[in-house]
Image: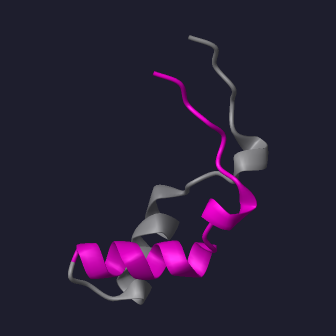
Amino acid sequence: MSREAPTDTDAISDEELTELLADAEETTPEAIERGADELKIASPEEATVVDE
């Protein structure tokens, strides 16, 4: 099985992702944002790359 890199047409915005998560969790986008702030999620630029 091969994994293809997502194309630009597959990408969604942060706001769209938040709305999808809120809908899936039956909550509000604001609650998702507050939860993310509490988790202190680092931006992708700050992520550590690990080879498996």
Quadrant of residue 41 within the rendered picture = bottom right
Q: Dividing the image into 4 quarters, which one contains the C terminus?
A: top right
Please provide the residue range marked out in magenta: 1-25
Q: Residue furthest right?
A: 45
Residue 33, magenta (yes or no): no
Q: Residue furthest front?
A: 1
Quadrant of residue 32 within the rendered picture = bottom left
Above-or-below relation of 51 to 28: above
Above-or-below relation of 5 to 2: below
Q: Residue furthest left?
A: 26
Residue 29 at what x, y percent from top left? 41, 86
Between 40 and 25, the one lying in front of the other is 25
Q: Residue furthest top?
A: 52
Residue 19 at what x, y percent from top left? 43, 82
Residue 5 at what x, y percent from top left? 66, 40
Q: Dividing the image into 4 quarters, which one contains the N terminus?
A: top left
